[in-house]
Image (cartoon, rainbow, N blue to C red):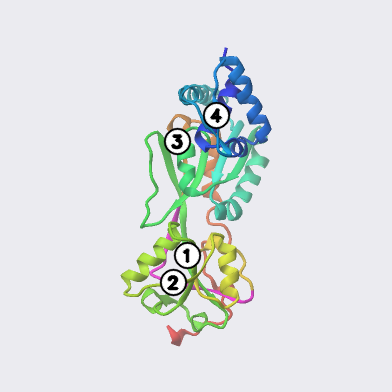
Amino acid sequence: MLDLARLRALHAVSVHGSVAAAAAALGYTPSAVSQQIAKLERETRTTLLERRGRGVALTEEARHLAATAQELLAIVERAETTLEERRGLPSGLLTVAAFASAARGLLPGVLAELAHRHPALDVRLTEVDPHLSVDLVARGVTDLAVAHDWDIAPLPAPEGVDQARIGDERCDLIVPAGHPFARRAVVRREDLAGQRWVCQPPGMVCHDWLVRTLRDAGCEPEVVHVAEENHTLVALVAAGLGVAVIPRLGTGPLPPGAVAVPLEPAPVRRLYALWRTGAARRPAITETVRTLRAHWPPPGVGGTTDAHRPHRDQDSV
């Protein structure tokens, strides 16, 4: 009889593309995943992984077996959901994927409350790019994802995946403390021409939003520094090297050299929780979504940015 844990390891390699990535998603070591697949090879008398360059690739037989594993895991999930629903209490393992700023600014409080209120529930968090997390939920690798979208890039809604809105997050213009905009109560998009920008790389939603918005306002943004992490962008702004548009979850407490100024119309990022339709009745899912909403917005995200602005000049608007 095929071992479900070994099938789960193979399925994870199929989804994530490597043994190391599968191990990270499952919370195992790469050696443990390799051992599970080696045992599955002996069990099935079939070669499942082939060396390809520095990595591995699934054989044709392995791809068929991984597809079967996905079906079996879905059946197990439905059975576990039914049992948990009958007990009426959140319990068991719940894997959660969240993008970086939500993992840092929202999830710690949520996870702490869940651990306190529901000791039988074992929630495991992994930081994942939002573009990947929806697919991980759809494929059954992750139970629940916290993802976001913008007006220019709506969140995909694959068949078999449900979602609930957590809340809306405003984005601010972050400028050096000595910048003329730092004295304003608000900056409008048409005022942004001629600025030097620090921004995320092309292909990321923040970058695409900036380019499209400024072009619609009649100017081409001059991007002088590129970094993926919001904290790096804030540090570059604080050093006087440019300005940036950053969601409030991504800023955290600003360093002395940086000031947040409201931008109008305000860019808004929408946060969602996503889970598989088959697990919708699971108390662990419903309670986690409820707790996410109860903790939204975190301090500093839903209010004004006055704490980051040393002086406001109403006449300069």
Q: Secondary structure at mark 3?
A: helix
Of callouts 2 and 1, which one flags the residue occurring earlier in the amino acid sequence?
1
Query: Residue 204: which quarter of the image?
Result: bottom left
Residue at 57% x, 78% y is: 240
Residue 6 x, y percent position in the rendering: 60, 23
> Outermost residue toward the bottom?
315
Question: In the shown orientation, is residue 297 left or right of residue 113?
Answer: left
Q: Nearer the viewer, mark 4 or mark 3?
A: 4
**Amino acid marked by disc 1:** Cys
- Residue 274 vs 173, above or below: the answer is above
**Amino acid marked by disc 2:** Leu
Residue 230 x, y percent position in the rendering: 56, 62
Query: Which is more toward the observer, 274 or 89?
Result: 274
Q: Nearer the viewer, mark 2 or mark 4?
A: 4
**Amino acid marked by disc 3:** Ala
Residue 171 belongs to magenta span: no
Q: Mark 4 highlights which residue?
A: 50
Q: In whole angstroms, how far apart are the C-alphas of marks 1 and 3? A: 29 Å
Q: Mark 3 highlights which residue?
A: 138
Residue at 67% x, 35% y is: 29
Query: Which is more toward the observer, 63 or 146?
Result: 63
Of callouts 3 and 2, which one flags the residue occurring earlier in the amino acid sequence?
3
Residue 300, can we see it? no
Query: Which is more toward the observer, 215 or 178?
Result: 215
Of callouts 4 and 1, which one flags the residue occurring earlier in the amino acid sequence?
4
Which label is found at residue 171?
1
Q: Secondary structure at mark 1?
A: strand
Residue 266 x, y percent position in the rendering: 41, 67
Find out whether the residues at labels 2 and 1 contact each other: C-beta distance under 8 Å. yes
Q: In whole angstroms, how far apart are the C-alphas of marks 3 and 2? A: 36 Å
